Image (cartoon, rainbow, N blue to C red):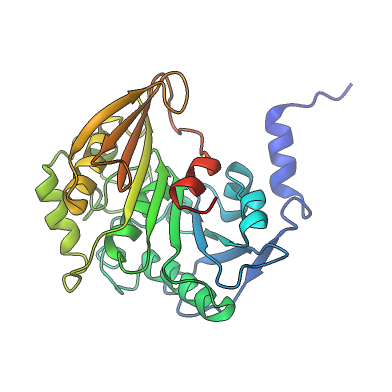
Amino acid sequence: MRVITLSGVLAALISSPTAYASLTQVTSWGENPTNLAMSVYLPSKLAENPAIILALHYCGGSGQAYYQTASYDRYADAKGFIVVYPTTSRDNHCWDVASKASLTNNGGGDSTGLVNMVKYLIEKYNADPAQVYATGASSGCMMTNVLLAVYPDVFAAGSCYSGVAAGCLAGSPGSSPQTADPKCASGQNVQTGEQWAAQVKEMYPGFTGPYPRMQTFHGEADTFVDYGNLAEQLKEWSALLGVEFSKNETDTPQSGYTKMVYGDGTRLVGYSARGVGHIVPPRPQMDVEWFDLV
């Protein structure tokens, strides 16, 4: 008798050629300095000027795998926006959030390639440049922080899960668990909000506009990317956005979660998940609500 296991089901999904039939592989989309791959979900009826969500996978993952983890299909179908599921194959399939190239505006790293995907879609589908968003989990959350910091004139907002502040891994020999300086993931890179903000501003010295809105989640039981990294993210974005902590809302959006509100809650919020490890399960509904796409 054949035993069907959860791991077997997941393996079948990942290997099946029809599991991702709704994703379109895109090639020749522009300068691609780190050889990223690009998959796109295009709804059957695009909006006249569609929004774009960049959905970034975790370490060891892929765009196709993250499509299974956090699918935005029904929201995209309802509102006509585009979802990009990129893939990096370098450094154990982890996004580069450590190199000078990736932490510099137009520096030629992973961040540059990801932004070029966005620019391609804006041109090809007349997408709205004011409605470009980033989301992701673990390494994808780390890159979400980096993209909003390095390209604040491209992204309007971010929403991500179980990551670290932009610049936390700066100067590390790599970005994966196998190659990174462990100081960041273990929660030992502790700075003031002003120090984080100064580091971010060095990533794009010529930028003088407002920074994107940020929503970030972290599990209190996370021993892989230490829970203390949530506080560092919130300090960073609080300083960049000029908003201060105002209140906690307990058991929001569910029992055991605490929503940490900054200012009036429209520019920065954090979510602390009691008893949750790595990663906090992505919540596409909350992402699109934060992006004003519902």
| Residue extending farthest right | 1
Q: Residue at x 26, y 42 (%)?
A: 233
Pick the front one: 201 or 73? 73
Please provide percent x and percent y for residue 187: 23, 34
Pick the front one: 105 or 294? 294
In the displayed structure image, the side of residue 259 where residue 74 appears, left or right: right
Image quarter of the N terminus: top right
Number of marks present in the image shown: 0
Q: Residue at x 16, y 49 (%)?
A: 239
Pick the front one: 126 or 164? 126
Residue 279 placement: quadrant: top left
In the displayed structure image, the side of residue 144 where residue 89 appears, left or right: right
Q: Is residue 199 above or below residue 225?
A: below
Please provide percent x and percent y for residue 122: 50, 75
In the displayed structure image, the side of residue 8 where residue 238 appears, left or right: left
Q: Is any atom of residue 26 visible in this view? A: yes
Q: Is any atom of residue 175 visible in this view? A: no
Q: Residue at x 44, y 66 (%)?
A: 114
| Residue extending farthest front | 264
Pick the front one: 252 or 143? 252
Q: Residue at x 69, y 46 (%)?
A: 14
Please provide percent x and percent y for residue 223: 35, 27
Q: Is residue 125 above or below residue 38?
A: below
Q: Is residue 167 above or below residue 47?
A: above
Please provide percent x and percent y for residue 147: 35, 60
In the displayed structure image, the side of residue 223 where residue 55 appears, left or right: right
